[in-house]
Image (cartoon, rainbow, N blue to C red):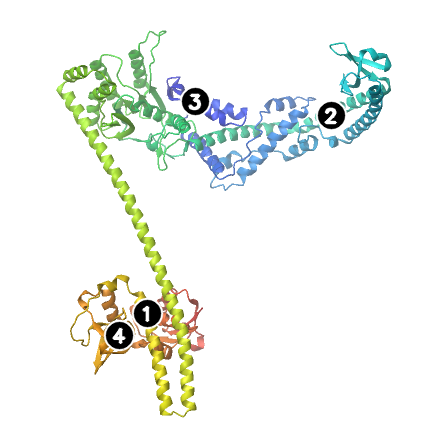
Amino acid sequence: MVYPENIESKLGFDKVRELLADECQGILGRQLIDKMEFHNDYETIASLTEQTEEFKKLIETGQSPPESYYFDVTAYLAKASIVNNFLTESEFYDVKRSLDTLYQTLRVIRRQPKEEFPRLQSMCQDIEVPYEVIQDIERVIDDKGQMRSNASPELQKIRQAIVRTQVTLRKKLVSIVEDLRKNDYLRSDVDTTVREGRMVVPIKTEYRKQLKGIVHDTSSTGQTIFIEPEAIVDLNNDIKQFMHQERFEIVRILTDLTTFLRPHLYTLKYAYEFLAQVDFIRAKARFAIKLNAINPDFQKRALIDWQNAYHPLLYLSYKKQGKTVLPNTLFLDGNQRILLISGPNAGGKSVLLKTVGLLQYMFQSGLLIPVQEGSKIGIFDQLFIDIGDEQSIDNDLSTYSSHLYNMKKFLIAGNKRTLALIDEFGTGTEPQVGASIAEAILEEFEKQRMYAVITTHYANLKFMAEKSQFIVNGAMRYDVDKLEPLFKLEIGKPGSSFALEIAKKIGLPSDVIKSAHSKLGGEQLEVERLLRQLEKQRSNLDREQTSLRKQGLEVDKLLRENQALKDDLKKNKQKYMQEAKKEAEALLQKANQRIENTIRTIKEQQADKKITKSVRKDLDSLQDELNRVEYESEEKQLPKNDEEMIRYVDTEIKQGDFVQIKGQTAVAEVLSIKNKDALLRIGSLKTTVKMNRLQKVDEKILPTSITGNMNSTTNSGSGSGSTLHNKVLHFSPDLDVRGKRAEEVNPIVTEFMDDAVMLSQKNLRILHGKGEGILRQVVRDALRQYPQVQSIKDEHADRGGAGVTLVALK
């Protein structure tokens, strides 16, 4: 039930109907728009809204059914139902096009996944479009709505005869016209024309006797006479006769086609009802897209839980003007049933009230509504509104009396499933009396557990809301500094009317404003002062929050830039490592070649001391070159700012001190000193350097990235060789981790794989034993971290099977 009868015009739903009608393709859809009504049955509303949501999805994914030829052919079907009646060519043409739209629409919907489009699939489940009817009409009627010449053999024969006769006729006319033109007997530039369906020649009146024939017409001036030459009379007669035969054959064909159509009329009538529904639902879906409307979570109880809801008509109007409508969030449920909205005039209270009424009315009429995703909506059995001036001369009702009459209706019919919307509650009479009556009515609403959204200026109602369990205050926000409404609802506190401030802004004399101020009671003044102060604090808080949001965005931007920089540094580090690896591989290849040459030279010279010494010197030179590569590799991995943290100490160098080789940036640890030589460790590299080439550095300010790496290398580097050269000589493709604990295996396998990848090994074996398969799993998890691994598999059963993992590298 809705009240009053003109609720649609008061809420603006009549305008919504007009906009929906504009979206329809045909009269059938517009007729359903006119029949829309407010429902209070859950299943009906769910079906209507879900149909619209599914069609909206079709449109948005570019799968919408055809949008043309939604003709109303119900009159044609009724005409065809009468025996011996027949449809005309144009009527069949409309039927053909609309049936094709029906057929294509069913195809589009039926090919959609049933789980995603259950409502639309259900709609077309029992719909049939006899394709043979479409084919038969297509066989007879062409794409211009004309009868095809091959619709029947007889028709084709007649039309061929007409063409032949017309060709003969034209040839004779050409000859006659040429003779007349030579003698200047013709009246105009027109050679021939048609009168009463027969070919005639326009002759000047004074030469009428020069051409024998039948006079059919005279021009309005009397200067031209239209004569059918005697020579073509028989041909015109033949054409006329053939046309009669043609018309007779066309009627016969149309009668047969109508007879063929007649058994399908009931099926087609049902199908056209479906087509009307499609046009109707499409209009609702297109309207929803224009509004950015959705189908919120629909619950089978009284509920309003809307996030960022806005008035649809105001949204469309603002959109044309390039403006933005401000949304509001509202909440009503079993514990918070009545929302009491206060605030300044022209602050948006009435618009918000109409927004609530219109959106609820739209949804319960089967339309989607403009709210944010995550919103919820319930169902109300009754929607009552008291908005605007309802005074009536016929019923002798004043404005206030009409409001009271509406309140009587609300109180009599209202219940816990009623939503009442009341604008300017209690106004229209003496304020104290009006406020008292309004409070009493509100108490009754509370007892009946009605839902309501009410706008008011009365302070006693605001106080009542603060004390009530089911009533909540709401305020329309106001910019205290600019004295402008913000059109934003804030739930949880009452609002001030800002009457004196608005009067001052308008320019009311200051004496009048001071006088009005002095006449206000002390309690009222204090309430207004507190409300204004609260509004100002809220405005300040909003500004601070806005500032914090901006700062947050700046922080997010800096974090993103920092992450991008880190990613770039990581990428460059990998690049440097790859370059170092390639250089090391090239140098290793060179080293192996030189070692082979050295061994061959020693053998050939039978270990001659001088040659051996020269060869050793050459190898030492190669060792220095290898050391340089490893120095540079270590240096590239150090943070750039480590160099800036180095500080030299002018004291004696001892074992355990940290030093730098003059002219280089790498930091080394002194392992031992013998005479004037010092054994140094730089990362995993050990080398001997003259003492006079070293500078001692202060290890107190060295970063742990240097000292820590030194210590860790001491612990792990002894087993794998101290130089790249040694790794080449001592690397074994077999690794045995049997007897190790699971936590020990991962770093061992990682070091083994690092060496294997750097030395370009191809095939590896890792012995881990079978046991419970724990070590096997740890080994293979570590191997999967390397993109260089091509395959991982068990050894042959005869050679260890699952106790050995074979690794192939790319």
What element does badge 1 sit on?
Answer: helix
In the picture, the quarter occupied by the C terminus is: bottom left
Residue 745 shows in this picture: no
Residue for badge 3: 15
Amino acid type of the residue tagged 4 in the rendering: Arg
Instruction: Name the foreground residue: 562 vs 405.
Output: 562
Q: Earlier in the sequence, mark 1 or mark 3?
A: 3
Q: Nearer the viewer, mark 3 or mark 4?
A: 4
- Neighbor class of circle 4 (other Cα within 10 Å; few <14, some 14-19, many 20+) is many
Residue topped by disc 4: 681
Q: Would you name the residue on which mark 2 appears?
A: 250
Image coordinates of residue 236 in percent, x first then y, are 82, 20
Distance of label 4 from label 1 (alpha carbons): 14 Å
- Label 2 or label 3, whichever lies nearer to me, is 3
User: Which residue in the structure is indicated by mark 1?
Assistant: 632
In terms of image quadrants, where is residue 703?
bottom left
- Above or below, 116 relative to 25: below
CA–CA distance in space, label 1 to label 3? 79 Å
Residue 752 visible here: yes
Disc 1 packing (10 Å; few <14; some 14–19; many ≥20): some
* Image quadrant assignment for residue 72: top right
Tell me: 514 left or right of 568.
Answer: left
Q: Residue at x 23, y 68 (%)?
A: 707
SS under mark 2 = helix
| Residue 602 x/y as whole percent | 40, 89
Q: Quadrant of the N terminus?
A: top left
Q: In this rendering, would 373 be left or right of 461?
A: right
In the shown orientation, is residue 216 left or right of residue 54? right
Residue 222 locus on image (x, y percent): 76, 9
Secondary structure found at label 3: helix
